Image: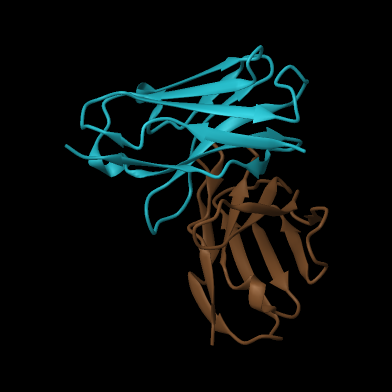
Chain colours: A brown, B cyan
Amino acid sequence: DIQMTQSPSSLSASVGDRITITCRASQTITTYLNWYQQTPGKAPKLLISAASSLQSGVPSRFSGSGSGTDFTLTISSLQPEDFATYYCQQSYSSPWTFGQGTKVEIK
Amino acid sequence: QITLKESGPTLVKPTQTLTLTCTFSGFSLTTSGVGVGWIRQPPGKALEWLALIYWDDDKRYSPSLKSRLTITKDTSKNQVVLTMTNMDPVDTATYYCTRNYGLGSLDPWGQGTLVTVSS
């Protein structure tokens, strides 16, 4: 299985801050990397597919980059509704695997 | 609009078999490239991918759970069924179904169903 490691596991930030979450794969996954946002009590929501493709309706302050084994999710200006847990997921080879999540909290 | 909804028991006893049904609308599981998958999330923990069935009946399973899982589809009913045998308290989790499309993106997700394993 391909292992996905996110860092940090949690972070505290203020509204308006720029934050970056990192996801590292245990082997190359080219750009088969997706990002999800999950708020408490809700199902995950797809934000970014194929490492950098923003889903329709997702605010442009979200962006993704990377290829191979190292990827980042950036929120350029954190908004109150962005406080959530973020997961990366690889779809390069079965079984699909997720990172352990990054919880973004209000400072 | 694409929707998925999970249904099944909320409480099962240890050693029992869990059967969950995902009923979906807005897409067809006969369309090339499309799949429906299951993911679970224990309370307070991360997401764990379980299984996936494709339009052509290709099936994929989590290696660690493969011996306990079976995924099937009924395209006439727009349903996908997941069975998990020999349930244990550690299997207590919210179980989600989701459409798998494109390059393995999971979107959208059902609302999830919490399954508790307890005697």
Q: Quadrant of residue B76?
A: top right
Residue A18: image x %, image y %?
A: 70, 81
Q: Give me the residue at 21% from left, 27% from top.
A: B15
Q: Quadrant of residue A93?
A: top right
Residue at 65% over, 71% down: A82
In this rendering, the answer to whether A101 lies above or below B41 is below
Looking at the rendering, which quadrant does residue A48 occupy?
A: bottom right
Residue A96, given in percent of the width and then of the height, sits at 56, 39
* Residue visible at 65% across and 72% down in the picture: A81
The percent coordinates of residue A15 (x first, y second) are: 66, 85
Q: Is residue B20 above or below residue B88?
A: above
Q: From the image, which quarter does the C terminus of chain A lie in? A: bottom right
Whether B93 is drawn above or below A62: the answer is above
How many numbered discs? Answer: 0
- The correct choice, above or below, for A87 with respect to A16 in the image is above
Left or right: B82 with respect to A38?
A: left
x and y percentages locating residue B52 in the rendered image: 56, 28
Q: Nearer the viewer, residue B10 or A84?
A: B10
Q: Is residue B70 left or right of residue B73?
A: left
Identified at 56% across, 62% down, the residue is: A39
